[in-house]
């Protein structure tokens, strides 16, 4: 594995409760991403980070916040979980190299975190 | 926003057959990636493409970066049962470092 760990792998929670998912990498990659995967929608970008304390929104960022205080950790927080946020969440990392060859700038994914909001 | 149309959505094929799938975009991309996802796991990179017209192989898999930079194709030759899974394309516009994914092609191989 490329050294990406997501935790927890499974979580069941109730509507209105806060939830934090953690992504930890040991590759020292600059870029980290959170995607959600739902049937019929593929993978949709929630937020991404291009460095410590540097983050930006993706296409489905409403209801989510992120933080990156260290290179190796990227946290995804649902301040008040809703049933529509039931999904599988994937973290991904990228070195952001622009050499254009040899696997540069590709996404490597974690194993996923399955969240169920009741 | 940007959209990727991936087709077909699903395929049932006989073992030994060749498979083709493609993605088209409303925007120009500078990088195309192809992934395979097995049940309960994260997507795994198959092929990365960086230049318009580029043709790259990985074993029985061949992918091409379309000349218009708005499309990409993945071919699997002589399919085997372990090819079963969901295949995703992803594209990145220059300098954004944000990848947009297609909705996936679910492949089932009949022995």
Image: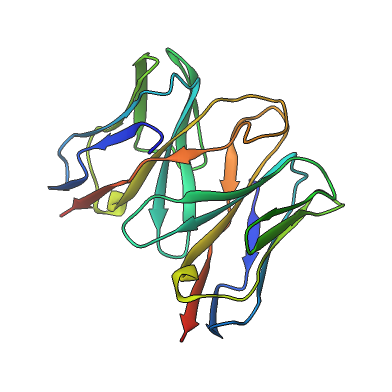
Residue A97 visible within the image: yes
Residue A5: image location, x then y, percent: 30, 34
**Residue B62, placed above or below residue B15:** above
Q: Quadrant of the N terminus of chain B?
A: top right
Closer to us: A99 or A50: A99
Viewed as shown, does residue B106 lie left or right of B93? Answer: left
Q: How many numbered circles are shown?
A: 0
Give the residue drawn at x 52%, y 38%.
Answer: A107
Closer to us: A109 or B70: A109
Residue B64: image location, x then y, percent: 76, 56
Give the residue drawn at x 40%, y 47%.
Answer: A36
Viewed as shown, does residue A17 lie left or right of A87? Answer: left
**Residue A110, placed above or below residue B46:** above
Viewed as shown, does residue A74 lie left or right of A29? Answer: left
**Residue B67, placed above or below residue A60:** below
Give the residue drawn at x 20%, y 53%.
Answer: A116
Give the residue furthest to the front.
B59
Viewed as shown, does residue A37 lie left or right of B102? Answer: left
Residue B72: image location, x then y, percent: 73, 56
Residue A11: image location, x then y, percent: 16, 46
Residue B24 visible within the image: no
């Amino acid at each position: 594995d490329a050294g990406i760990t997501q935790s927890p792998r499974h979580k069941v929670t109730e509507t209105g409760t806060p939830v934090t998912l953690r992504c930890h990498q040991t590759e020292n990659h600059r870029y980290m991403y959170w995607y959600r995967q739902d049937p019929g929608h593929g993978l949709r970008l929630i937020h991404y980070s291009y460095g410590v304390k540097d983050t930006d929104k993706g296409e489905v960022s409403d209801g989510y916040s992120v933080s990156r205080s260290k290179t190796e950790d990227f946290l995804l927080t649902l301040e008040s979980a809703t049933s529509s946020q039931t999904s599988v969440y994937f973290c991904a990392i990228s070195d952001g190299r622009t050499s254009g060859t040899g696997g540069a700038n590709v996404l490597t994914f974690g194993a996923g975190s399955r969240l169920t909001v009741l | 926003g940007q959209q990727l149309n991936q087709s077909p959505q699903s395929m049932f094929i006989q073992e030994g057959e060749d498979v083709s799938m493609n993605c088209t975009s409303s925007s120009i991309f500078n990088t195309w990636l192809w992934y395979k996802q097995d049940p309960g796991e994260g997507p795994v990179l198959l092929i990365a493409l960086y230049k318009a017209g580029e043709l790259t192989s990985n074993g029985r898999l061949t992918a091409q970066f379309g000349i218009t930079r708005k499309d990409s194709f993945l071919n699997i030759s002589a399919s085997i049962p372990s090819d079963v899974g969901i295949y995703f394309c992803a594209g990145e516009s220059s300098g954004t470092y944000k990848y947009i994914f297609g909705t996936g092609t679910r492949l089932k191989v009949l022995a």
